[in-house]
Image (cartoon, rainbow, N blue to C red):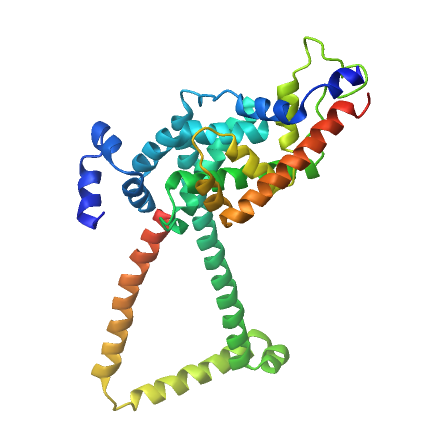
């Protein structure tokens, strides 16, 4: 968008005009410190960012906090966004980085109980309280960071292989290899978690 | 029990668990909270810039005071101060003031050039100070 185009969007930056502007136009306005434009970007991408965050943190309050943190970080780093990928792809990268940093910080402080609570001889029984899918989802975070990231993004609706490769900044071949290894490793972890005390 | 789990196809279980995870909606006031956080962040940044400016001013002041004291001691000869106290130092200062006035009185150079230089410095100050203040406000 030309400077005059940005000015036009800015001049009528309410309601429909804001919604009609493309992500890149909004990014350009946000780079000049326009918080309204950034607010529109937040409204557009809040659900997907919240979902990425939730899949890492597995807790509503924490994931909301991390999603907010991701947007604040994005606003700060916006000048570094060159526009060579879509804003959503760039947001995935920022969100994953924020969540993984927080998880590793918590892990160092011993705050994260990565072991699912119900793993143990008594709780391994498949009773009605045993949430197997949740256990599997939690196991994803026990993978190394890069594998956890690609697995999380892969199972998010609407995220393509291309986008994941862009987020991770790796070629498609490498991504496929990583996916294969991540699945194998995840299977081992799930197996271990289920059978550890059985 | 172990047998029960052995019977499960782990690949299918993992696939099912991950792909069937429901998509959640962000809280209704999420965007407003992000905006609030950005506002707080901007305030923090502004305060940080102010703090940096204050510390820089303090550092300059400290350096200026130390340098001033150094120059004073240098001009007044520390040994005179030590030997004769304040009157000795004052005498040394009088000497330097008289020397300066003597040189200034006999100056026949370009007064307009000196005045122009002073004016240019003042103009530069008038541009730089508001610009710095504006930068601080934006940070």
Q: Position of residue A45 (x, y in %)?
A: 39, 31
Q: Splitting the image into 4 quarters, where does residue A47 fall?
A: top left
Q: Is residue B43 visible?
A: no
In this rendering, the answer to whether A172 lies above or below A111 is below
Q: Position of residue A86 (x, y in %)?
A: 37, 42
Q: Splitting the image into 4 quarters, where does residue B32 fall?
A: top left
In this rendering, the answer to whether A84 lies above or below B109 is above
Q: Position of residue A50 (x, y in %)?
A: 47, 28
In this rendering, the answer to whether A40 lies above or below B57 is above
Q: Splitting the image into 4 quarters, where does residue A36 fall?
A: top left
For the C terminus of chain A, the image quarter is: top right
Write the residue at 58% across / 22% down. Answer: B16
User: Which one is nearer the viewer's eye here, A37 or A146?
Assistant: A146
How many callouts does the rendering have? 0
Q: Is residue B24 visible?
A: yes
| Side of A172 where A128 appears, left or right | right
In this rendering, the answer to whether B99 lies above or below B120 is below
Write the residue at 33% across / 46% down. Answer: A31
Q: Position of residue A112 (x, y in %)?
A: 68, 31
Residue lying farthest to the top in this orientation: A128
């Amino acid at each position: 968008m030309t400077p005059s185009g940005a000015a036009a969007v800015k001049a009528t930056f309410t309601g429909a005009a804001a919604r009609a502007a493309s992500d890149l136009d909004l990014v350009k306005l946000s780079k000049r410190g326009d918080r309204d434009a950034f607010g529109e970007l937040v409204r557009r991408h809040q659900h997907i960012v919240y979902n990425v965050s939730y899949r890492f943190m597995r807790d509503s309050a924490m994931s909301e906090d991390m999603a907010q943190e991701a947007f604040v970080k994005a606003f700060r780093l916006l000048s570094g966004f060159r526009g060579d990928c879509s804003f959503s792809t760039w947001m995935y990268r920022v969100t994953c980085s924020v969540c993984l940093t927080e998880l590793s910080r918590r892990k160092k402080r011993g705050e994260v109980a990565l072991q699912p609570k119900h793993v143990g001889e008594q709780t391994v029984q498949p009773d009605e309280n045993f949430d197997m899918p949740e256990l599997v989802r939690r196991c994803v975070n026990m993978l190394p960071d890069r594998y956890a990231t690609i697995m999380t993004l892969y199972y998010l609706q609407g995220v393509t292989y291309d986008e994941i490769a862009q987020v991770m900044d790796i070629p498609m071949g490498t991504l496929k290899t990583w996916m294969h290894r991540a699945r194998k490793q995840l299977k081992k972890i799930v197996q271990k978690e289920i059978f550890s005390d059985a | 029990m172990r047998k029960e789990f052995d019977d499960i196809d782990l690949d299918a279980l993992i696939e099912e668990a991950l792909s069937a995870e429901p998509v959640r909606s962000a809280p209704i006031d999420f965007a407003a909270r992000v905006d609030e956080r950005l506002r707080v962040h901007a305030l923090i940044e502004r305060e940080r810039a102010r703090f940096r400016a204050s510390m820089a001013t303090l550092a300059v002041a400290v350096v200026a005071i130390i340098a001033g004291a150094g120059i004073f001691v240098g001009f007044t000869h520390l040994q005179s101060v030590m030997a004769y106290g304040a009157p000795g130092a004052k005498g040394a200062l009088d000497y330097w003031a008289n020397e300066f006035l003597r040189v200034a009185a006999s100056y026949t150079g370009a007064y307009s050039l000196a005045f122009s230089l002073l004016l240019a410095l003042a103009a530069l100050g008038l541009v730089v100070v508001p610009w710095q203040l504006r930068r601080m406000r934006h940070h």
